[in-house]
Image (spheres, rainbow, N blue to C red):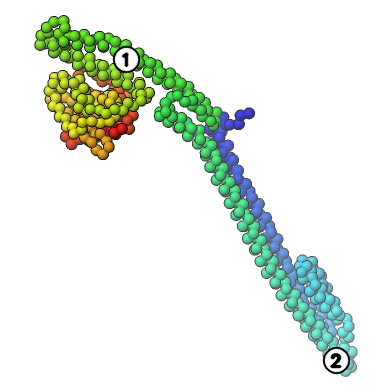
């Protein structure tokens, strides 16, 4: 059973966006709900504090009014004052009962104050008798003073306790708010981290197919066309991967056909070229008879160009076979190697009146003779063909540590900076002017670099003090 995958990158982006946004939306909803709950609780606490505070203020006011009316009654014995005092006492009892319900912690003290109020009975205070001397109510005044003193103390204690209860309620509410806020911050942090994790996951999921495409394209450019392209991810990206694999197969087939064509054309050219060289050699050796000076010059020109054509064909063969070749290490006599290479270009050097300067302090080197010769042959051919008539070529051999350094410099047109690195690419032709009857194939420098790199060396274009073009070969000792 295959795993589900989106049909397009857009669908994957939308899924990733809404999935990543979901925790943020949840955080917003949770925050709003928490803040609403916290605000509702704050409102309830505030309302409770206000109601209890107002109730306490009413009780205090009613007690003061009741005491004032009671004392006025003792002084005037007015029935209306007694009724007012009785009404205020009744209201106080109701308010104290309500206070006990609202603040259960203070219900005992509210009951004590209510009992003290109930014990206070103004009906027991006899009115004065007219035209008599029995008007002394001092005993009742003392009784009321004691009662109101007790009531005042109980009232003060109750109000003080109410104040402490309000302060504790507000502190508890503040502590609860802090706990809620800390919990909210913790959950918001968790949701934010979840959002970040989802963003990273979907970024990786979205970016992975693109990275796979990039890697596959890099593989096609570096390791060749032999591996199968497989791209996972959305269906449209997988379809691009299949198209890329189809293109790889077509390029692989075209590459095989090109290699086959080069092998066949190289083989087909070698047969008539061998006959041509054999014929020119017979003519040069005067097997067919004596040759005039002009005929000999023509024969030399034909031989020289046949040699150049053979070098071009061998370059094509080398270009196709280099990856499969192994190194054959031997002790090379550098003088003999240079003589073999130089003999192929003496005629051209004489015809173009070139000045050749060779400086060497080495006699032997350990390396792959064939590949070193191929590299030097191509560099020398490049120098001879691109040097104008009357120009100069300088070849310097030297040893630096465990490295053979050969600089081949020539006069003529400098290689443009934009072509400085591309000259080593297969089939690339620089804009520099080439002389000679045979145009280069564009693989000589590419073959030269590959031959020297297979031995662990390098071939590069370097600046020279006197010449506009200089190639430097570096070959390690094996």
Q: Secondary structure at mark 2?
A: loop
Name the residue at 24% across, 34% down: 405
- Say whether residue 330 is visible: yes
Place of residue 249 in the rendered image (x, y in percent of width and height, measured from the top left):
46, 21
Place of residue 330 in the rendered image (x, y in percent of width and height, measured from the top left):
29, 27
Place of residue 215 in the rendered image (x, y in percent of width and height, measured from the top left):
45, 32
Name the residue at 18% across, 36% down: 465
Please tell me the numbered disc located at residue 266: 1
Q: Classify residue 262 by image quadrant.
A: top left
Q: Residue furthest left?
A: 293
Q: Residue furthest top?
A: 288
Q: Quadrant of the C terminus?
A: top left
Name the residue at 20% across, 25% down: 336
Q: Is residue 40 left or right of 234 when viewed as pictured?
A: right
Residue bearing mark 2 = 136
Vertical position of residue 367 compared to residue 42: above or below: above
Place of residue 392 in the rendered image (x, y in percent of width and height, measured from the top left):
15, 28
The residue lying toward the viewer, choosing from 238 and 465, is 465
Vertical position of residue 278 compared to residue 25: above or below: above
Q: Classify residue 265 by image quadrant.
A: top left
Q: Classify residue 432 by image quadrant.
A: top left
Please tell me the numbered disc located at residue 312: none
């Amino acid at each position: 059973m295959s795993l589900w995958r989106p049909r397009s990158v857009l669908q994957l982006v939308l899924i990733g966006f809404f999935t990543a946004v979901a925790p943020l939306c949840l955080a917003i909803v949770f925050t709003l709900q928490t803040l609403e709950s916290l605000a509702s609780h704050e409102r309830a606490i505030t309302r409770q504090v206000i109601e209890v505070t107002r109730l306490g203020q009413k009780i205090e006011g009613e007690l003061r009014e009741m005491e004032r009316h009671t004392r006025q009654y003792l002084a005037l014995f007015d029935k209306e004052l007694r009724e007012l005092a009785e009404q205020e006492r009744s209201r106080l009892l109701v308010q104290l009962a309500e206070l006990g319900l609202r603040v259960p912690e203070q219900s005992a003290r509210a009951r004590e104050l209510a009992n003290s109020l109930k014990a206070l009975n103004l009906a027991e205070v006899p009115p004065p008798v007219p035209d008599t001397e029995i008007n002394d109510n001092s005993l009742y005044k003392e009784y009321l003073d004691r009662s109101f003193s007790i009531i005042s103390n109980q009232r003060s204690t109750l109000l003080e306790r109410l104040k402490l209860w309000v302060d504790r309620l507000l502190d508890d509410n503040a502590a609860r708010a802090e706990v809620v806020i800390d919990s909210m911050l913790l959950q918001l942090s968790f949701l934010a981290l979840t959002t970040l994790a989802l963003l990273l996951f979907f970024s990786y999921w979205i970016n992975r197919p693109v990275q796979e495409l990039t890697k596959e394209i890099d593989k096609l450019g570096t390791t060749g066309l032999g591996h199968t392209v497989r791209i996972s991810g959305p269906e449209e990206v997988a379809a691009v991967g299949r198209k890329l694999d189809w293109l790889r197969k077509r390029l692989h087939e075209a590459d095989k056909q090109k290699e086959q064509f080069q092998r066949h054309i190289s083989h087909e050219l070698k047969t008539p070229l061998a006959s041509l060289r054999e014929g020119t050699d017979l003519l040069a050796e005067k097997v067919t008879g004596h040759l005039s000076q002009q005929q000999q010059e023509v024969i030399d020109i034909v031989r020289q160009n046949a040699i150049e054509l053979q070098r071009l064909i061998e370059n094509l063969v080398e270009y196709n076979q280099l990856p499969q070749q192994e190194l054959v290490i031997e002790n090379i006599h550098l003088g003999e190697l240079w003589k073999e290479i130089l003999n192929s270009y003496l005629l051209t050097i004489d015809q173009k009146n070139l000045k050749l300067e060779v400086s060497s302090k080495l006699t032997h080197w350990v390396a792959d003779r064939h590949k070193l010769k191929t590299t030097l042959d191509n560099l020398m051919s490049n120098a001879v063909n691109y040097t104008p008539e009357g120009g100069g070529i300088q070849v310097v051999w030297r040893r630096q540590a465990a490295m053979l350094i050969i600089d081949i410099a020539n006069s003529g047109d400098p290689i443009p900076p934009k072509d400085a690195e591309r000259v080593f690419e297969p089939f690339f032709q620089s804009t520099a002017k080439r002389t000679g009857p045979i145009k280069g194939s564009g693989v000589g420098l590419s073959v030269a670099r590959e031959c020297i790199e297979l031995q662990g060396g390098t071939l590069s274009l370097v600046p020279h003090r006197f010449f506009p073009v200089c190639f430097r070969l570096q070959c390690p000792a094996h």
